[in-house]
Amino acid sequence: MTALAAENISIAFGGVRALDGVSFEAASGKVFSIIGPNGAGKTTLFNVISGLSIPDDGRVWLGGEDVTVLAPERLARRGLSRTFQNLQIFSHLTTLENVMVGRHRHESTGLAADLLHFPTVSRQNRMTRQAALNALGRIGLGAMAQRPAGNLAYGDLKRLEIARALATEPTVLLLDEPAAGCNPTETKNIETMIREIAGDGITVVLVEHDMRLVMNVSDRIHVLANGHTLAEGDAAEIRTNPAVIQAYLGTRNAGAEAARAFG
Amino acid sequence: MQHHRLFPLIPLVAIIVVLPLLFPSAYYFRVAALVFIFAIAALGLNLLMGFAGQVSLGHAGFMGVGAYAVAIGPSQLGIAPLFSFVLGAAFSALLAFVVGRPILRLRGHYLAVATLGFGVLLTIVFTNEAKWTGGPDGMAVQQLAVINWTLRRVSTWYWVLAVSFLVSAVIALNLIDSPTGRALRAIHDSERAARVLGVDVAQKKLAVFVISAVYASVAGSFFALVNGYVTPDVSGFLRSIELVAMVVLGGMGSIIGSLIGSAVLVILPQALTIFHDYEHAILGLTLMAVMIFLRRGIVPSLSAALSGSHK
């Protein structure tokens, strides 16, 4: 079954076609990766899917429903959440509170109740806190719960952002370069995390530069170059696809990347 | 060990009860009353600025709405003072709701200028609609009467305003420790992240803007009632800046900070009158010195220093 589909997505910024007729279907409970050299349009595609940008043309389908023009908060309530390439941590909140905000769509107290602190608010706070504590425990950050999130180590912040998105209980989770800037141990942790998330039946859509990680976890890989679809297939097919190798070797900076990925 | 959310108010209640015993004259009650009034307005603005991270340079405009409501209601429309007070708050909420929708889409400096314009606009209305407001000279305000009892003595006002401030503080602390409060604080740090987690950012911003407008309106009504008259200055640009200064000086995001910020900016000018011509220069230098040495505001900086010295 298809959890998330993009159909013919096109978007231009000031005359530059960032995406041109991109389509894909991500199967339910699988890891679907989007790769490509810098400037290929991966993050733009993510912004379109998550509602931060509206495409000039094309449609986005979530669980069979057209969600092309829905705002991010509406998508979140329908079960799509994401992380960001450059961390978007609530740094003035504690680690625990960050995850508690992730529970927002499951919280049901009204504004009047919040202002007057009705008993429902205490109950809601307890439930949210417990759910968030459990989520932190699962990623091994339980001991950091009361620390200001801004004080956490970089690798922990990367995992915290994933845990926070998971707290929304999504059906589809978009991960934008979760291993960027991580050391090999941290990357290994992220890899384990992605496997567990998909194991729980959540569809993972991954944008990542670390090809080893992509090749290890992906069920299917979609390759973008200059806003176009270059290829799609499983890891073995992509690794041997001449057009893909050409695209990576063709850009000056990506040479090492391609060598590491395909060598 | 986590303290109860209302814990910070306990020492405050003690101070409020003891303070009148030390007051040598009615003048002191009056100054304290003004401190509470501006603390209520600053507290509301702090919810908007310190917690949700949205600036307003026109918040005194809502003080003006509250002030003129208790002035115009009883004298020109025959509405009871207490009811005028409530109507003023309701009108401020409505005004904030209507104005907030388009304005809160703006960010940072753009939001600052738009709210500034809103405050200036209201001051012009209060100045020009002389038939209703008495124009630049202002108008008298009837005393607050509940059934047959009239609130006259400044020491009574002290207690009424102290309790009003405490109620305002409890509501603010309630909000902070709630789903809405967490969402607001998240918006302060990253709107995009809040949105992808399902927080309706526009709706939350509007809600806190309306709440802070009601706080300002209530403060404005009290201000007019205690003074017994009102002029357009109540909603002026300088007044708005003063409210922002109280929030920042006391500490963004600190409830007690809003009270301290209000106390400093109400009491200091009074205390500095002994310096005659140099009064304003010393006030300005003091504010600069506080911000340079206590850069997170008085309460957060001092409490960080205190908890640091315990470790």
Image (cartoon, coloured by chain):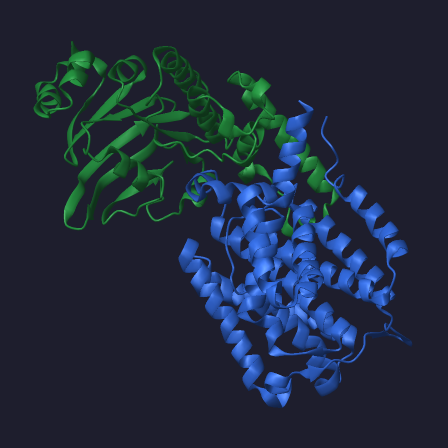
Chain colours: A green, B blue
For the point 87% across and 50% down, the residue is B18
Classify residue B41 by image quadrant.
bottom right
Residue B225 left/right relative to A171:
right
Classify residue A107 by image quadrant.
top right
Q: Residue A188: horizontal and vertical position, in percent?
A: 37, 12
Q: Residue B36: horizontal and vertical position, in percent?
A: 74, 59
Q: Residue B245: horizontal and vertical position, in percent?
A: 57, 56
B49 to B41, vertically: above or below: above
For the point 34% across and 49% down, the residue is A69
Work out whether residue A106 can be spotted: yes
**Who is closer to the viewer here, B15 or A152?**
B15
A51 to B63, vertically: above or below: above
Classify residue A29 by image quadrant.
top left
Name the residue at the bottom extreme: B131
**Who is closer to the viewer here, A112 or B63?**
B63
A203 to A48, vertically: above or below: above
**Who is closer to the viewer here, B284 or B200?**
B284
Residue B181 left/right relative to A118:
left
Q: Residue B34: horizontal and vertical position, in percent?
A: 73, 63
The quarter of the picture where the C terminus of chain A appears is top left
Q: Total label count?
A: 0
**Who is closer to the viewer here, A182 or B9?**
B9
A99 to B189, vertically: above or below: above
Residue B59 left/right relative to B103:
right
